[in-house]
Amino acid sequence: GAVVSQHPSRVICKSGTSVKIECRSLDFQATTMFWYRQFPKQSLMLMATSNEGSKATYEQGVEKDKFLINHASLTLSTLTVTSAHPEDSSFYICSATGGANTGELFFGEGSRLTVL
Amino acid sequence: QQQVKQSPQSLIVQKGGISIINCAYENTAFDYFPWYQQFPGKGPALLIAIRPDVSEKKEGRFTISFNKSAKQFSLHIMDSQPGDSATYFCAARGSGTSGSRLTFGEGTQLTVNP
């Protein structure tokens, strides 16, 4: 199946700093990418949807100025957590769809963010 | 509404047994119903998916049963193995483009005892 790569897999940062997480589709062109947040023992919560070359569409309650999403190419989307705080500590997962497999979502391995 | 209700929250099964996880949805516009398997610290991986034009789909030990009139679908894992121990999520997606969002169930933590 198609491969979606996320980097970094784990990141620890100090409160007040910004952290960037990358999501790449390795073998297909991702017309749409989704960013999710998952707290321990909970389901995935959709944060935003991004289409290549367009501004991301954020879900209700997600601060777009805090969670900056850029989808500048068909193979790369980035999520930047700005001025991170301990409550932003979570598991962030991206997924992508597009190419020949337009009906299926492919997920990255996730990025564990810990804000001290 | 966009909700997908999943049960049970947790499930313990003996090796070789059948694991059954159920999901119910409300939005009749949903037309794609995938199941995902997630191991700790990893992203979800697609296990099996079904569209509402069929009532059952089987892939190896995994079977989805779909009841359109009841708006319910379930995952059956036959001959459950300890390696199947993971969290399982059902999901549903509305009709339209592939860019439509997935709505996830709450998840079921499956433990298969040896």
Image (tube, coloured by chain):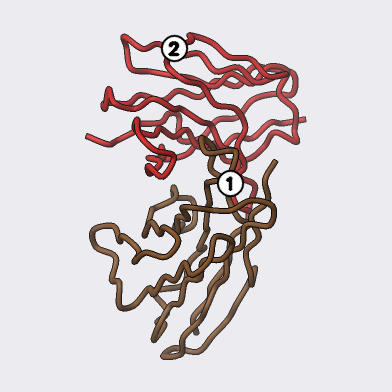
Give the camera-side residue of A38 and A100.
Answer: A100
- Image quarter where the N terminus of chain B lies is top left
| Same chain? Circles 1 and 2 | no
Mark 2 secondary-structure assignment: loop
Q: Which chain carries label 2?
A: B
Q: Quadrant of residue B56?
A: top right
Q: Name the residue under label 2.
A: B53
Amino acid type indicated by mark 1? Phe
Please report contact status of discs 1 and 2: CB closer than 8 Å, yes or no: no
Colour brown, chain:
A
Mark seen at residue A106:
1
Taking depth in this image into account, of A79 and B41 the one nearest to the observer is A79
Q: Which chain carries label 1?
A: A
Q: Which residue is drawn at 59% across and 53% down?
A: A29
**Rendered residue at 26%/26% (across/down):** B26
Q: Position of residue A53 (x, y in %)?
A: 42, 65
Q: In this view, does B33 lie to the left or right of B84?
A: left
Q: Is residue A17 left or right of residue B113?
A: left
For residue B113, side relative to residue B73 (left or right): right
How many other residues sit within 10 Å of disc 2, few (<14), some (14-19) or many (≥20)?
A: few
Vertical comparison of B57 with A61: above or below: above
Q: The red chain is which one?
A: B
Q: Nearer the viewer, residue B101 or A16?
A: B101
Q: Where is residue A113 in the image (x, y as percent from the top left)?
A: 53, 73
Q: Is residue B2 above or below residue A38?
A: above
Q: Where is residue A22 in the image (x, y as percent from the top left)?
A: 57, 70
* Residue type, label 2: Asp
Q: Which mark is residue A79?
A: none
Q: Quick one: which residue is furthest to the right in this view?
A: B114
